Image (cartoon, rainbow, N blue to C red):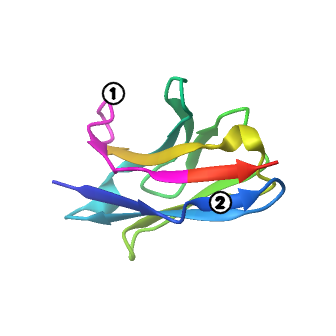
């Protein structure tokens, strides 16, 4: 079973950048679709973006389009989320999730990393 661990969160001023990492342990990481989600206090979890095993990006949420970039390194078992031009509204716990090609749900989750953007 795949396990995911996120890192890279922290406190940053508006307009700043952070790069989150999602490191996987386990076999066949390169077979999984990986996504980033986020959840702000008092709000529902929000889809941010996801990436195919080949590296193709499925889509970005409108709220992050043009500012966030997802990428993956299958040799390093890692998916990255580069976040630029951060806004206070981006403050949330960011979690990565993984699923197989034909799964409709996201059964594998990391523990999350906190991102706080100050104005």
Q: Is residue 31 left or right of residue 34?
A: left
All told, the count of numbered labels is 2
Judging by the rendered image, the residue that carries numbered circle 2 is 11
Range drawn in magenta = 100-114
Q: Is residue 112 above or below residue 46?
A: below
- The crowding category of the residue bearing disc 2, from other C-alpha atoms within 10 Å (few below 14, some 14 to 19, many at least 20), is some
Number of the front mark, 1 or 2? 2
The tag on residue 104 is 1
Circle 1 packing at 10 Å, graded few (<14), some (14-19), many (20+), is few
Residue projecting furthest to the left: 1
Q: State the residue at coordinates (33%, 41%).
A: 101
Badge number at residue 4:
none
Quarter-of-image position of residue 91? top right
Element on which disc 1 rests: loop
Q: What residue is shown at x 20% (from left), y 64% (from top)? A: 26
Name the residue: 53% across, 39% down. Answer: 38
Please provide percent x and percent y for residue 83: 69, 56
Q: Which of the two residues, 85 or 12, is positioned nearer the viewer here?
A: 12
Could one spot residue 65 in this view of the protein? Answer: no
| Disc on the earlier residue, 1 or 2 | 2
Q: Residue furthest bottom?
A: 75
Do we see residue 25 in this rendering? yes
Q: CA distance from mark 1 to mark 2?
A: 33 Å
Picture residue at 52% right of the left edge, 58% below the top: 55
Dot 2 falls on a residue whose secondary structure is strand
Residue 92: x and y, percent? 57, 42
Residue nearest the viewer, comparing 47 with 72:
47
Q: Position of residue 1 (x, y in %)?
A: 15, 53
Left or right, residue 5 beside residue 46 = left
**Position of 70 relative to 75 (above/below):** above
- Predominant SS of the magenta segment: loop
């Amino acid at each position: 079973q795949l396990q995911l661990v996120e890192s890279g969160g922290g406190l940053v001023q508006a307009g700043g950048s952070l790069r989150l990492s999602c490191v996987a342990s386990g076999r066949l990481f390169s077979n999984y679709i990986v996504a980033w989600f986020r959840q702000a206090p008092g709000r529902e979890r929000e889809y941010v973006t996801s990436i195919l095993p080949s590296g193709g990006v499925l889509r970005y949420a409108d709220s992050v389009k043009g500012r966030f970039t997802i990428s993956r390194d299958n040799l390093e078992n890692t998916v990255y989320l580069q976040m630029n031009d951060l806004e206070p509204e981006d403050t949330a716990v960011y979690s990565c999730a993984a699923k197989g090609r034909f799964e409709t749900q996201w059964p594998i989750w990391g523990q999350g990393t906190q991102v706080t953007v100050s104005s």
